[in-house]
Image (spheres, rainbow, N blue to C red):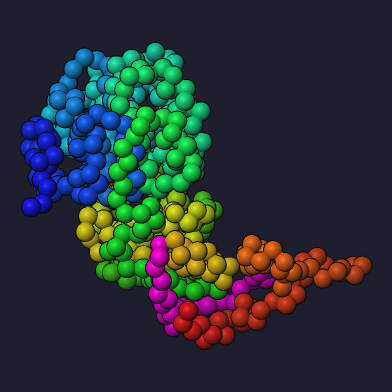
């Protein structure tokens, strides 16, 4: 018989609301983590977003807290980003509909007095980004002396974002006698070191190896010769509003986010808003909310901005380019196919990205099928600086694989008066568009 939330001893006040929000049965990480967290030991949880890992630590925490008590928080949940802080806050709100447990979610970027007001009436659970919490603590707006449970969520991202010093600082002021729960989407050496530093004899719970993409995501990729063609292709795809009903376009940089936004705003019907890291805090939150509510069909995001973004019913994830870190590919595509919805992830790669795609395929232990660019999509020739950049990158990759590699692309010795950066040995397919389209066979 399948395990139920009753079997996992979730308290009544919480059980009552679970059915209403569509939590019928525990997810594998919940099944594994809830009894271990309840037992009081430290826990290292390896689970990606989308697996139900937030409720996996929240449900046993609620059972421990039982009901509202005192003014000072007893549980501290540290998260790396504002979006995740808001998200976890919303999850608590939803799960505690029939409980009187109180919480506040705080994060940087807006005036801290507003957050101090949220804490003042008394709370049981505090969700916070490390820097903002430290500000509040120093100003005397929050007391941490009652903390009995510490959760560090998305530990891998905490490390990437350089939050270790702030976390260490906070740990000096919270009681030593406490239960620690550390959750991470991936497990690597740094996460291991972090768990050794913060956890005492932890019990490890894990669902699926760290880089397994959601099984339900249908993945494919297009080989696209240049940036302009990528823009033409997404523009073409997005014209089909019925199929591409709710889309996240991932881009590596803020600049690319801006270019993609400008083009689709001009060319694609419907209402869209842009979400990327250098936009003001309010614009970002508004864009996410509008997207969640379905007012926005297309959201453009960098990897950083998308952390903690939890929207179901996303029809497509489009990778305009490949992410800097290979694991982020898994995070990106995990945004679709949530809660058993079938989703699709489409990746556009230029010749210099083929190398990275192969690495990603090796990590996810899957071969991603290639799809031909539709005939209607215009494929302009690659501008010289762009093809030079690609060739240089391909050379760099070849050198990584074979340090003795001389480089197919190198600068000709300049004669007096000759211009810099002339392309030598440029493979023809990079500049001859037609060939590129025809020349693509299977992999
Ligand atoms: P998370 O991995 O915490 O980001 O959760 C991913 C999504 O799954 C969220 O939308 C949760 O509300 C949802 N979820 C978590 N647990 C369950 C469950 N037991 N049944 C159905 N949905 C769930």
Would you say 426 lies left or right of 121 here?
right
Q: Nearer the viewer, residue 111 or 344?
A: 344
Q: Nearer the viewer, residue 197 or 23?
A: 197
Would you say 388 lies left or right of 192 here?
right
Q: Which residues are magenta?
A: 364-392
| Residue 238 seen anywhere in this rendered image of the structure | no
Q: Is residue 402 above or below residue 33?
A: below
Q: Residue at x 56, y 76 (%)?
A: 380
Magenta span includes 376: yes
Q: Position of residue 393 (x, y in %)?
A: 64, 64
| Residue 139 seen anywhere in this rendered image of the structure | yes
Farthest residue toward the front?
201
Would you say 364 lies left or right of 414 here?
left
Q: Nearer the viewer, residue 199 or 170?
A: 199
Magenta span includes 395: no
Q: Position of residue 124 (x, y in %)?
A: 24, 23
Q: Residue at x 27, y 34 (%)?
A: 89
Q: Residue at x 82, y 71 (%)?
A: 412
Q: Residue at x 28, y 69 (%)?
A: 243
Q: Is residue 98 above or below residue 423?
A: above
Q: Nearer the viewer, residue 159 or 243?
A: 159
Q: Position of residue 234 (x, y in %)?
A: 43, 68
């Amino acid at each position: 018989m399948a395990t139920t939330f009753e079997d996992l001893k979730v308290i009544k006040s919480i059980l009552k609301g679970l059915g209403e929000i569509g939590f019928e049965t525990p997810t594998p990480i919940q099944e594994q983590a809830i009894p271990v967290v309840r037992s009081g030991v430290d826990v290292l949880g390896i689970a990606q977003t989308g697996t139900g890992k937030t409720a996996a630590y929240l449900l046993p925490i609620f059972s421990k807290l039982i009901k509202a008590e005192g003014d000072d928080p007893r549980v501290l949940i540290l998260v790396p980003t504002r979006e995740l802080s808001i998200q976890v806050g919303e999850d608590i709100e939803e799960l505690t509909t029939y409980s009187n447990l109180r919480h506040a979610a705080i994060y940087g970027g807006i005036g801290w007095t507003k957050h101090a007001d949220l804490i003042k009436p008394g709370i049981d659970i505090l969700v916070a980004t490390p820097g903002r919490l430290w500000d509040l603590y120093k100003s005397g707006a929050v007391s941490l002396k009652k903390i009995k449970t510490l959760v560090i969520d998305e530990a891998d991202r905490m490390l990437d974002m350089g939050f270790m010093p702030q976390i260490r600082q906070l740990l000096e002021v919270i009681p030593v006698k406490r239960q620690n729960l550390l959750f991470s989407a991936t497990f690597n050496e740094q996460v291991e070191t972090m768990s050794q530093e913060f956890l005492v004899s932890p019990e490890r719970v894990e669902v699926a190896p760290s880089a397994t993409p959601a099984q339900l995501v249908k993945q494919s990729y297009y080989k696209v010769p240049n940036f302009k063609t990528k823009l033409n292709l997404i523009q073409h795809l997005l014209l089909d509003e019925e199929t591409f009903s709710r889309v996240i376009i991932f881009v590596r940089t803020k600049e690319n986010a801006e270019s993609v936004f400008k083009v689709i705003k001009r060319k694609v019907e419907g209402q869209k808003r842009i979400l990327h890291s250098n936009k003001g805090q309010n614009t970002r939150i508004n864009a996410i909310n509008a997207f969640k509510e379905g007012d926005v069909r297309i959201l453009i995001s960098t990897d950083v901005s998308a952390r903690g973004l939890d929207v179901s019913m996303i029809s497509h994830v489009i990778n305009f380019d490949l992410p800097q870190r290979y694991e982020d590919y898994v995070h990106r595509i995990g945004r679709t196919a949530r809660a058993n919805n079938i989703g699709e992830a489409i990746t556009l790669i230029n010749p210099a990205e083929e190398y990275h795609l192969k690495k990603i395929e090796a990590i996810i232990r899957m071969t991603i099928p290639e799809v031909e660019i539709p005939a209607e999509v215009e494929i302009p020739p690659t501008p010289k600086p762009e093809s030079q950049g690609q060739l240089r990158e391909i050379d760099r990759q070849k050198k990584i694989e074979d340090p003795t590699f001389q480089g197919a692309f190198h600068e000709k010795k300049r004669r007096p008066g000759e211009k810099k950066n002339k392309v030598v040995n440029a493979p023809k397919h990079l500049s001859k568009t037609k060939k590129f389209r025809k020349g693509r066979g299977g992999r």
